[in-house]
Structure formats: C-alpha cells, structure tokens
Image (spheres, rainbow, N blue to C red):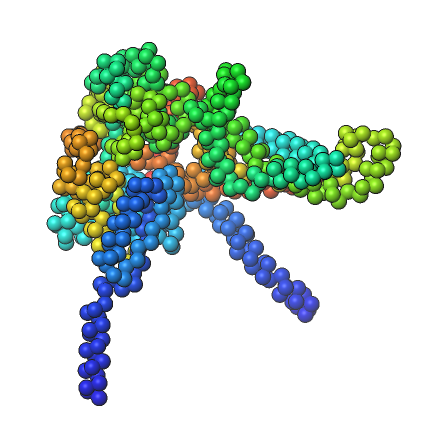
Amino acid sequence: MPARALDLWLYAAPFLIVVGVFVFYPLAANVWFSFYSFSAFSQEMKLVGLENYRRLGTDPVMLTAFINVGLYAAISVLVQVGFGLVLAAVLSQAFLGRWGGVLRTLFFVPVVMSITVIAFVFTFFYDPMTGLLNMMLEEVGMRSWTRAWLGQSSTAIYAVIAVSQWQSVGYVMMLFIVAIQGIPRDLYEAADLDGAGPVAQFFHITVPQVRDMLVVATVVTVTGSLTVFSEPYILTGGGPGHSSTTLATHMYRSAFFRDEMGYAAAIASVIFVATMAVSLLQLRIFGKAR
Amino acid sequence: MKKLIRSVSALALAALVAAPAFADTELKVFHRWPNAPFKTYIDSVIADFEAANPGVKVVTDQVLNDAYKDKIRVVLGSSNQPDVFFSWSGEWAHNISRNGRSMDLTPVLESNPAWRDSIIPAQIEPFTRDGKVYGLPWQMDGKAIFYNKPVFESLGLSEPTSFGELMALCAKLKEAGHTPLLFGAKSAWAVSHYIGTFNERILPPEVLAKDYDRKTGEFTHPGYVTALEKFAELATCMNPAPNGIDHEAERNAFIAGRGAMSYLQYAEMGFLKKAEFPYGFFIFPQIEGGEGNPTSLQGAPQGWMISADTPNKDVAVKFLQHLLSPEMGARLTSETGIISPIKGAITPASATPAQLVAFEQIMNAGDPYLWLDTALDAQVADAYMKGVQLLLEGQKTPAEVMADVQAAAKRVRESL
C-alpha cells in the first residue's frame, strides 16, 4: 500500500472505528435480532426467520403508526417549515427594531425546554376536567368544542402534533433567520426600486435564496416525524387504544412492555429503511429542482 | 522472627475479627417509589440497615410504576443489574424467574424457618413457580370501591351488595348531580383491574385458571364478552372521557370531592388522608347470573427479588430479612399505609381502623386474583387494555376486543 494511502486510512481510522462501533454495528445487530424471537432478559433466542417481518405486514397497529407519522410529517412541514419561514422573514424585517430580537427569543424559548417538562405541562393544559384549554373554550362561549383532547381517538394524535409544533417552530425559524441574514441586501434594495412589495420579495428573493436551508429543514422535520417518540409516549402512551401510536412508540412498547424484542427490532429496521428512503427521495427531488 | 510472625498473625486475626461482616459492599436496590411517603420510608429503613451493617452502602434507584416496568426489563438484561429489586407477583414475576434473572430463595427460607414462617404463606404463593420461591411479598393489596360517606348519607345510600344495586345507586347519584364513579383509563393498568374484577365475578374459576395460563389461554368462553358488556354498562356511571385522565388524576379528583366513588387499592389509603371527608369502602359487589367467585378480591402481593447473578448474595438476603421483619412491617403500615404481609405487623397500634378492615377483607377473600396486567402474558394484557380503552370510546364492541385478545393469546401459545 502506498504511504499516502496508508496515511489516509490512519487519519480516517478513529472516525471509522467510532462510526463502525456506534452506528453500523448496532444497525447490523438490529437486523440480525429481527430474525429472532426473544425476551428482553432472556438468554435464549429462537430463530424465526422472516416471521417478524411477515407479522409486520398484517399488524394493524403498523398501519395506524404509518398514518400517524404521515400526519405528523405533513403538518410539521406545513407549520414548522412553512410557517417557520414566514415567521423568520417577518422577524428579519428592519421595522421591528429591537422587538425583532425579543420576539425571536420568545419563539425560541420552547426549543430549549425539556420535552418531558413540556409534555407534562400540556397534559395539564389538555386535562378534560381541570385543563386550561377547555376552560378557555368555555369562557369564550365555545363549550361545544370542549373535549378530552388526549382521551379521544379522533383528537389525540392532533393534540400531540400541536405540542410538537409549538416546541419546534422556533428552531426551524432560527435556521431560516440565519439563512436570510446571508442574503445580499442589495437584492432587496433592487426589488424595492423595481416596485416589488414585501410578498413579492418573499417569494422571488427570500424563498429561492434559502432553498438549501429549505432542504435541510424539510429533511430534518420529516425524518424527525418518522422517529417521534417522547411527545406521544408521555402525553398519551400511544392511546386511546393505539390511536396516537407512532412507529417509535410501537417499537418501544413491543420491546419493553410486550417483551417482544425480535419484533421490536423488525420495527426498528422498518423505521431505518423508511427514514433513509424518505431522506434520499427528498434530496433527489430538491436536487432536481436545483 | 517467630515473635514477629506471631505478632503479625495476632494483628491480622484481630483485624479480621474487628472487621465488619460485609466490608465495603455496595448493594444496588431498584424500586418503584420515587414518591412520598414510600421513598421516605424506604430511605429510613436503608439508613437503619446501613447503621446495623457497617461497611455496607445501599445505593438506590427508583422510577414510578409504568416506567419501572420498562426499565427493569432493560437493566435485568444488562450487565448492570441491581442486587435487589421490586417485583409484582404472578406472571410478571414468573417471566423474570423463568428467564433465570431472579435467585431461588427456597434454600434460604428452608435454612431460616423462623423468617419464612413470619410471612403469611398465601402471600408467598404468587412468587412461587414449580415449587420454588423466587420473590418475597412486602405488601398485601386489594381493590375496593371507595366512596364519599357524606354524599352517600345525604342521599340515603348504602353499600351495594349486587351489580344491580350498584347501577341503581349510580342512577341516584347522577340525578343528584354527582359524578357517580371516577375513572382514569389513561393508565392502562387501571383498566386491567376493572376487567380482572368483572372476569372474576362472571367466569367460572376453572375457565380463568386455564385462560390466564399462557400455555393454554384461549379466551373463547362467552363470559368474557359478557364481562365487557357489564363493564360498558358500568362505564355509563363514570366521568366523561375516562381515557383523558390517568389514575393519579382520578384519585386526586376523588380526594377533592369531585366524584362519589373511585375504584382504588388499599395501598392508596395513605393518599386519602388528604381528603376532607370521611370515606368508606366495599369490595366489588357480586354480579347477578355470574358463575364466578362473588367475594373474591382483585389484588396481589408485591415484593422483592434478588438478582440471580448478584455477587452480594449474603448482604442481599440480609437486607430482605431486615426489610421483611415484623418491626419494619409494622412501621411500613403505620408510616405509608401499605398493609404488610408479615404476621403480627397489622395491629390496632400500627394500623388505622380502615386498614384493619382492609386486612380482614384481604384475609377473608378466599381466592385472591392477581392484577390482570401481571397475571396475564404482557401481549395478552396489552391487547385487553388497549381494546378496552377503545370500548370506552365506543370504537370497539366487546366481541371485537375479545377477538384481539384471542389473537394475542394464540400468538403467545404458538411462540412457546
């Protein structure tokens, strides 16, 4: 081996070892485990071949989980990426002066809060007997709208998704603010001279100029939706029934509640493939668009 | 030289004699009570144990209920196992012992008959598998309907002795503007307690014995559907949207007087001290036409296990002996409200009148049934609990819930 190639391998070795041990080995081990049936604390593993994957295809909870993460992704892209970009554009306007900084901080505060704390706060917020949300609805004469937001199959997943939006929109907004600050000001000045209003400037300057960040934010948001766990687990436990179950909560309950480690490993493999496929698809779509 | 050797030997012997029995031993204890008054009690018991055993340091870790169920499975499968850990009884405990994670305590008990005989035998039974004891009970428990006495008295109501009477009582409470029965079904385990109770009252004991066994469970008896139908009938007495609140919220609502009744565990009596009204309780009434046991009690002992691989076996056993001594048993009841299974621990000096009644009810229950979520295989229990949450919403019928349970039971049978 030439000395230069050896040097390259030596320089790359620490990274390769770390990634190999902490990323690729667990991934390979997970796929291996998915061909077995075993308990979390069992010393025996029973080879079942593709049985866990066959069962995944007939598991109605998987379908519910896919629909829920689909909803999660769609709403998150709309609110976090869409609204986050609009918010960033507005808060970057000079006329807000120092209020722009104050508002950015306010929108960013939920990002630094622990999701566990947020989930507990919203558990009280949504409480059907003493919760603030129902009390507020009653106060404004919308009593018919009051309900057990987390306790009804029809609303549980939306109530959970709303909490995620509240927490994460500030993060995406901040990403866009950084991207907007990198846009040359003379583009806006030229647009002003040509008589373009704020809306036209947003669509014809801001959006094209932050396209790279748009790709990053969309990929992060969609893959985050596919793996969302804490919010549904703490707020609803995936219930009522399995109505607010996501792929990650289904995997977790299979492993640590129903004690089906092999089946949980199969779900984890599906999550990995889905996440990878969606990310590649998005990169391809955005790549073509460029 | 001989003198020197003799002196050194004498010093070494003296050091050995003077050394504590367990020099520098760290005992890891994992339990499910991060909340007062239980944690306070356990910490004080541990402090006493450490004082009596110099050199032993007890390190505790604790998480609440559902989180404990998840976490214990992970730590028992790891190399970082606790030496002593909390365990429910029944299938939950059997799953641990079957997989070789808990120590067989039979030889320890046989070599220490006085200690063994100080524990109520019926409470050891649910920790026993194939004639071997893998855990020891620390608390006796049962489930009863607790009610607000002033509300009952103001409406001239008395404790019901049948399901029909219970429903009639609910109707009167509703008419008077009360929420008859509080229920927090967001806690899936609380759902299982109701279903277990209805099954006990309606189904013949031999059918339950066969179906609750993971090797033979089929759940095809029509009584299971009847039990869910009766439960759905009772649900009409409950607060709206029970799936929206958890058990703690249910208990707090009862304490705050926002409902007339709540199905609680005897172990929760400690929390009821905060209620500003006198309360009473009765075991779930018999159900007309039921073929089950009309006086059985849903409930089971909860206790402790020692890890099979612990390097500190002797210290762990000694710790359990300390924890399960008559003195600690009496303190457990007086300080936390938990009913101790140690003989002689429940006396008028250590227990309140209500606890004495609860103790009698447990002892007289005849055939106590384990909590359904710990009696059944976890997959079957999950199908039951998730299904019943949807039943409460009208999303599933009793027959549909049982179809899911049957499918889960079949999957478990076929996996063995």
Q: Quadrant of residue B158?
A: top left
Q: Residue furthest bottom?
A: B1
Residue sitting at x 34%, y 26%:
B256
Residue A96: give x, y in percent of width and height: 72, 35
Residue sitting at x 75%, y 37%:
A94
Image quarter in which the N terminus of chain B is found: bottom left
**Residue B226 visible at all:** no
Residue sitting at x 30%, y 34%:
B271
In the image, B265 versus B197, the foreground residue is B265
In the image, A152 versus B400, the foreground residue is A152
Q: Residue furthest right?
A: A194
Residue B234: give x, y in percent of width and height: 32, 18
Residue sitting at x 18%, y 42%:
B330
Residue B360: give x, y in percent of width and height: 15, 31
Q: From what the image shows, is residue B26 above or below residue B179?
A: below
Residue A225: give x, y in percent of width and height: 57, 36
In the image, B171 versus A7, the foreground residue is B171
Q: From what the image shows, is residue B278 above or below residue B66?
A: above
Image quarter in which the C terminus of chain B is found: top left
Q: How many marks?
A: 0
> Is A62 on the left or on the right of A192, as rendered?
left
> Is B299 on the left or on the right of A60, as rendered?
left
Q: From what the image shows, is residue A182 above or below residue B150?
A: below
**Residue B278 visible at all:** yes
